[in-house]
Amino acid sequence: MFGFAWLMIAFPLVGAAVNGFFGKKINNRKFSGWFGTAMLAGSFITALAVFFTYQAQNFTGADRFQEVPGWTWIAIQGLSEKYLQIDFSLLIDPLSVTMMLFITGISMLIHMYSTEYMSHDEGLPRFFTYLNLFVAMMLILILGANIPMMFVGWEGVGLCSYLLIGFWYRNMENAKCGMKAFITNRVGDFGILIGLFMIFQNFDNWFRLQGMGDASALNFRDILLNAGPVLQGMNPADVLFIALFLFLGACGKSAQFPLHIWLPDAMAGPTPVSALIHAATMVTSGIYMVTRLNPIFSGNETAGFVVACIGAGTAFMAATIALTQNDIKKVLAYSTVSQLGYMFLACGVGAYWVAIFHVITHAFFKACLFLGSGSVIHGMHEEQDTRHMGGLARYMPVTYWTFVISTFAIAGIFPLAGFFSKDEILWQVAIWQSKFGNAPAMLYVLALVTAIMTAFYMGRVTWKTFLGKPRWTAEFVKKHHHPHESAWPMTLPLMVLASMAVISGAILFTPGWMTGGEPREPLAHFLDVSAHGPEGQRLSAGDEHAAAAHGEHELAAAAHGADTHEADAEHGGEHSAHHEPFMLIGGSVTSTEITMAFGSVLLALVMLIYSNRRYTGDYDPKKKAAQKAFGPLYAFSQNKWYIDEFYNNLLVRPGVWLSSKAWQIFDVRFIDGIVNGVAKLLGGAGELIRPVQTGFVRNYMLYLLAGAVMFMLINMWSYLVGGAS
Amino acid sequence: MTDMVANSVWLAGLLFAIGTLGVMIHRHPVIIFMCIELMLNAANLSLVAFNRQHFSHAWRTMDGQIYAFLIIVIAAAEVAVGLAIIVALFKHRTRVDIDEINFLRR
């Protein structure tokens, strides 16, 4: 039924092949760009068709996992009757459908934008080759029906990000940033590999014991359908290990705390690449993976707790760093790290659909912000430092307004998309029932502080760039007089994305207090199955699994968001106390929710207005007001908490030292010693025999004669001896 | 008949020894060449002589004599090349002394 879904991957692959093999020969910039864009448009249309077909079918239960058979990819004959077979096939389920819709849609807009942004670059066909390949890999990642396919996409995305970050490879700095991204991702890949191996081992064992010959321990469908009983039979420590190793992989791809360092450096690539990496592809894959394998994370409370803590911690840390950065793209990069932290926070508290919700809304406004910053950089002729901007609103109205809208959206101002997703995350944290005492309260405060900082730094970068007095460099004014607005292929995507940043939140979710009754949550209903496993196969199917009943409450809370009090009423009993948010204002859950939501909106608005006051008018970065006011704190933030320096001293320097020692001692002395020793031996032997070659014919003659005489003597002697015997 | 062959072989041996000694003690390349010719002819002589000895009704073959012709041809070719080298050397350095021509060693 979904056979045509293959087209979605085929389109960008064809685009990559045409541009990659023939792009230089065709040598037509317009063709290269628009062909790549058209391929993505085809992909997007296919995704829409898949979505509507899927919607029309109204699948229930296990049917909601629709596999699109492809071909047998790997087949290994086992020793026993069962053999391992891995198919190259697709999985169409609510999660993958949701992901593919916004991935193809936003990628298409970014491609369109790139046709103009990169129009003067000599490597344009190469750029579109990588871009198309990137999207194809991302689609393989999310659509793959089994773990190895996801891993192919996982690595493919890493490869393409490396190629794109180092796109301007002639500059060594850019190439280094690409390497940094790749190496950091390798660390995460180690984690995900261990996690996936452990999943395979445990599930395969269980399937063998149960005699389920058809089930494959690598297939997502079989894993998700059987996750409940398998995980219950497992040692909790094992579940924790799997979850943590998988999360390490997610940290690598989605730039969470220990491995977040590559994402800000990914700014070295062209700006559309940043938009693609930050919004639609790559960084969302970690969230996708955690959501896809969510039973494992829900199966162990400690795992969820770790995920939530790392998420909230990263969100807070990145936000503090973003406060002081001057490069417009750096601010946006750290804001992405921060928003990804929010998503993992949502995953950690078990609200997987909210994480996906925030992925979607974030994709819209972050893509818009990045493309907007690209437009600014384009208009300012490659200027990225906000200290040298200011007053651009007059010259770039479309960029300005779309940027402002997205800033308000990311800050979580009321009717915009960010408000719905971010406040839902905050709410989910507030109602999280954890065995870790007052962890929800602390995480909530951390997330709220982060939200306030988000509003401030986004306001700062926006006002600094677009308002206030022009602070353009003399050189720029001399050369170009004033910035210019970008052409329509750049502004049109901005407008589309900005309008999506306005409406997407309200479309996908409306909390109960706003509708005055039941919350309207189409996304949650759509995702329900893939985020929690189908009916009857949930982590805890009934009362007999008393130990796991706790988990079900968590899931119910996650799925139904605001109406947890109703879930309480249904399930009744001893858990109801835990379902209350940790702080009650006025006694009712709804009023608490309203207070929290509007409290955070108010704080965000205050910060936006405050930053407006601060960074417009007679603001002058040369005064260094903030540096003077905060001193070491400012430097701490400006230097990104010294994490790069920490890694440099802890890992890179010893690594370099070790390898240089290995080079000097092992390679130079040992390996080279053997090679040179053999050469010296032969040379010395040659030197020893060399005097024999005098160069005089008569000497050679003498040797000849001596040889002949000796030969004769031997002959004669043996003749004599032979004759005597 | 046997005597004749024996005599021829003795003569060939003598010629060969003279040629060898000549090559070893003479300094002028042309004389060395002549000595080499001497050695070649010694070989020719013994080939012809042995062919004569072994020629019979049972084994009617002229191989030895044919080889002698081959050697004459090769010697002629060799002389042509060798003389050319000597002339070239002579053009290059005024004196042609075999003791001074060992620069291929270096």
Image: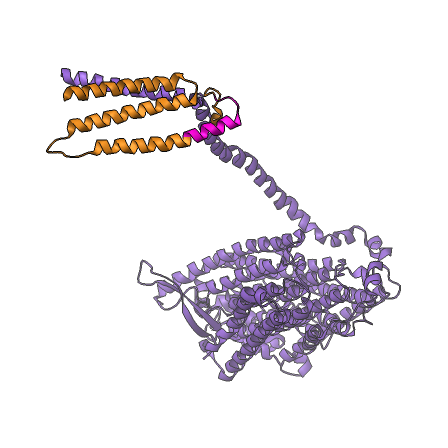
Between residues A311 and A256, which one lies in front from this camera angle?
A256
A364 sits left or right of A608 in the view: left
Residue located at (25% from left, 25% from top):
B45
- Main secondary structure found in the magenta portion: helix
Q: Please name the color used to draw chain A.
A: purple
In which quadrant of the rendered image does the C terminus of chain A lie? top left
Is residue A236 in view?
no
Q: Position of residue B41 (x, y in %)?
A: 29, 25
Residue located at (18% from left, 16% from top):
A720
Q: Position of residue A525 (x, y in %)?
A: 56, 78
Q: How is the image coloured?
A: by chain
User: Which segment did they paint magenta?
Assistant: B82-96
In which quarter of the view is residue A271 placed? bottom right
* A512 drawn magenta: no
Q: Please name the color used to draw chain B.
A: orange
In which quarter of the view is residue A274 placed? bottom right
Between residues A302 and A657, which one lies in front from this camera angle?
A657
Is residue A41 in view?
yes
Residue located at (77% from left, 51% from top):
A635
* B91 drawn magenta: yes
In which quarter of the view is residue A339 placed? bottom right
Between residues A596 and A524, which one lies in front from this camera angle?
A524
Q: Position of residue B14 (x, y in %)?
A: 27, 17
Q: Is residue A364 above or below residue A698?
A: below
A717 sits left or right of A613 in the view: left
In which quadrant of the rendered image does the N terminus of chain A lie? bottom left
The number of numbered discs placed on residues in the rendered structure image is 0
Q: Is residue A424 above or below residue B30?
A: below
Q: Is residue A343 above or below residue B9?
A: below
Q: Position of residue A599 (x, y in %)?
A: 75, 71
Residue closest to the far right: A618
